[in-house]
Every structure is written in C-alpha cells, then in structure tokens.
Image (cartoon, rainbow, N blue to C red):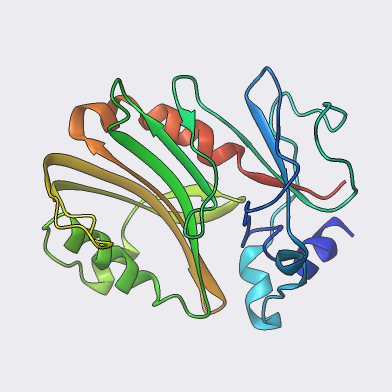
Amino acid sequence: MMLRHFIRYVAATTFFLSVSGCGDRESTAGLVERELSSSEREFKLAESSTERFRYQTRHAAGGDSSVPGSGGGGGPKLVFTTPEGWTDKGASMMRDINFSFGEKGEGECYVARLPGAGGGLLANVNRWCSQMGAEALTEEQVAALPVKPLFGQPARFVTVDGTYSPGMGTTDTFANYRLMGLILASDAGAVFVKMTGPKELVTKNEAAFDQFTQSIDVNTN
C-alpha cells in the first residue's frame, strides 16, 4: 500500500521533492520536513519506469511528525537531515534542496531533477566531467562506476577532480576543485545530488554527503 501511494505521487517519492513549498519544519536533531506542492503530487511516472524506483518508505532518524510548525496537512512530505556544519539555503526554481558549507560557504551541495528522459545517465555523467575539464567517459566506464543508495535505489556515484566551470551564466572557474555526486536516472527523468568545492573540503565532507543522501525520504503519513 505504501508503495502504491508512492507511485501515485512521484515528486513525493523517488522523483521527488520539489520543495518550493510551504510548511517547512526542522527539529533540533536537524531533521527537516517540507510539504510537497499539489502539482508535485499529481505528477505521475510512466508505468514502465515505476519498477525502477521501488523503495520502502522510512523515517529519517529523529523524525517526529508532531513537531510544531509543520503547517499541518496529511500530504506527502519530503524529509532529510542537515549534516552538522552545513547551512540550508532553501529551495529555488532549479534546486529542490540547497546547502552551503565551509568557512566561507565555498562548498555547496544540492538536489535537482530533470523531467522526461533527462538526457540519460551517460550524457549527465559526461556533463559533469565537462564542467570539471575532464575527459568524457565511455558507456562501459559509466556502467562500472560505483553505486550508493538514493531513495533506496542504486545511484551512480561520480567523483571528478579538476578546474570547475559551473556555467549557468557565469564564466568563473575554480581550480583544484572536486565534484562528488549521485545520479539516479531512467526514461521517466533523473535525480541529481551534486556536491562541489575545493578538493580538500569536499573530501572532508564525504561522510556528511553520505549522511545527507541516505536521509532523504518521503513521509507519506
């Protein structure tokens, strides 16, 4: 029953999480819970893709649906845990979850998604490689990348070092950077968790990255 509920509400589930919404809440343990918008609840995955995104709903550690300030309501809620030392910068049009970290906020980690085919796994991995000035990977190399869990599914784990060129209207570049991220892709769309920053800083925050990505869930209670 919980799985069927998930399939009906994609953004609320693996696909996730547009947190443009109202009713944000945070507990003292760092657990954040955000209401999903009505449009997100109505977005449905193609039946052929739902099998690829099966997962069992779970509550992040310290979750408490009775925390004051949740905004009420019984709809699906995105939940995640903010790692110690990370600053939640709030959602934006392109980022469903958005953090900065480091003494000057020079590191960032965010969650984003693309609808439809999303370009596919190979294209998105190589888009990240291009942003770091690295050579493109072959299909075989991408298939051999390690995996880490995201929404209970095996997402490809990418680590690339180089000079970071974020694009998006800026010509700035950042030398000696590391990009670390997860991509969960199917013909229904793609979910990305991307962390960038000075190589040493990102390396120190890999455990926090794992803590965050493993905490992301949808509470359908």
Q: Residue furthest top?
A: 28
Q: Which residue is rendered at x = 31% and y = 73% of the image? A: 123
Total numbered circles: 0
Quadrant of the frame with the N terminus: bottom right
Name above or below for residue 209 compared with residue 125: above
| Residue in the foreground of this view, choosing between 69 and 14 | 69
On the rendered structure, is 216 left or right of 105? Answer: right
Q: Measured from the top left, where is residue 173 in percent x and y? A: 12, 49
Q: Measured from the top left, where is residue 86 in percent x and y? A: 45, 26
Name above or below for residue 6 compared with residue 56: below
Q: Which residue is rendered at x = 83% and y = 65% of the image? A: 4
Q: Which residue is rendered at x = 44% and y = 20% of the image? A: 85
On the rendered structure, is 46 left or right of 197? Answer: right
Name above or below for residue 61 compared with residue 151: above
Q: Measured from the top left, where is residue 198 in percent x and y? A: 20, 34
Name above or below for residue 203 compared with residue 72: above
Q: Which residue is rendered at x = 31% and y = 34% of the image? A: 107
Residue 137, quarter of picture: bottom left
Q: Measured from the top left, where is residue 212 in percent x and y? A: 52, 35
Residue 216, quarter of picture: top right
On the rendered structure, is 65 left or right of 110? Answer: right
